[in-house]
Image (tube, helix red, strand yellow):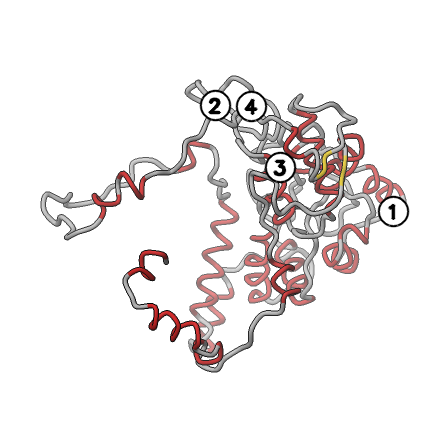
Amino acid sequence: MSKFLKSISIGAVATLLAVPAAAQTFGLGRAALPEEISAWNLDVHPDGSGLPEGQGDAIDGEEIFAIQCAACHGDFAEGIGNWPKLAGGMDTLDREDPLKTVGSYWPYLSTTFDYIRRSMPYGNAGTLSADETYAIVAYILYSNDLVEDDFVLSKDTFLDVEMPNADGFILDDRLETEFTKWVGEPCMTGCKDTVEVTMRALVLDVTPEETAADAAVVEAAAQQEAAITAEPAAVAAQEEAVPEPVGASVDPALIAEGMKVFRKCKSCHQVGDGAKNRSGPILNGLIGAPAGHIDGFKYSKPLMAKSEEGLVWNAETLAGFLAAPKTYIKGTKMGFAGLKDPADIEAVIAYLTTFSDP
């Protein structure tokens, strides 16, 4: 902006500044109120500016972490499955396969605080208070042996924490050193005739595996959508490709819709042939089964208590749980906030009826 202003007259600048806000927005909308701006202005800078009032220590953080974070990141921030490890990895950055955690890699503690406050817990982002966020960050620091358990993290003590990799980054000076190489007429000679994909992210163990059942349902849903505008006979033919539900007949279109909704669940739960437990159990054979029925998965104590009380998963109980997991079973490890649309709940339950074998 400074270079632009230098190239125009002061009179022109005055004219620009004098243009009414409504004219600049074509008469649409209004100026944001200060309180509206402050509600979104949450960024925290490396120097600590932007931090909210509040405090927390690792002792309190451990309990909050166990409820809000441990289902994915482990009780000790060690990570579960493909969910990120938040602790460990010290002195591994010079290796071919370094472990990059908050303690070993991140140069600024502000990045940790800012990310957790904005994006965590998974499926319920933005629900943590400032005190809870401080406590969780303190526990992560404690898990990396960077603070004592009674260290109170706040905006006043934030910069007292020394991040081990604070000097491991350099400033991005490409605008000054490389920008001139980016501009000008593009070179369109000597280009490759074809582009070939030589490696998939699956090699890095970050691409979710697609089971045969997933692929079959995806294909069935695609066929079902393509048939919406077709003749009734064609629609009926496509419906035969949708997996048969367990028990009473269920609308194939509803099953196909449930497959789409289930994408919100796939990061934690698998279904179909070859399904494995992740941070959540497999969901094969869920309908009609007692709570906590999958062998080898460590369910939360509150859920197992419900199981002992006789909780069985059916359309009614699943609907209640999926709408508000933490309300339906207080203390559940499931971090997902729930499905707000009753139609989505109905659809995903219909989808789960197609997987009968536990």
Query: Could you say where residue 163 lies in the image, as x and y percent from the top left?
Result: 58, 27
Q: Earlier in the sequence, mark 3 or mark 1?
A: 3
Q: CA distance from mark 2 to mark 1?
A: 47 Å
Q: Earlier in the sequence, mark 4 or mark 2?
A: 2
In percent of the image, x 59 and y 54: which residue is there? 262
Which disc is residue 164 wearing?
4
Residue designated by label 3 = 278
- The amino acid pointed to by label 1 is Gly
State the residue lying farthest toward the left.
Answer: 189
Q: Earlier in the sequence, mark 2 or mark 1?
A: 2
In percent of the image, x 61 and y 58: which residue is there? 40
Q: Nearer the viewer, mark 3 or mark 1?
A: 3
How crowded pointer 4 is (Cα within 10 Å; few <14, some 14-19, many 20+) is rated as some
Residue designated by label 2 = 98
Q: CA distance from mark 2 to mark 3?
A: 23 Å
Query: Could you say where residue 51 lies in the image, as x and y percent from the top left?
Result: 65, 45
Q: Earlier in the sequence, mark 2 or mark 3?
A: 2
Contact flag, marks 1 and 4 (Cβ < 8 Å) = no
Q: Secondary structure at mark 1?
A: loop
Q: Quadrant of the C terminus?
A: top right
Residue designated by label 1 = 310
- The amino acid pointed to by label 4 is Pro
Q: Is residue 308 left or right of residue 16?
A: right
Q: CA distance from mark 4 to mark 3?
A: 31 Å
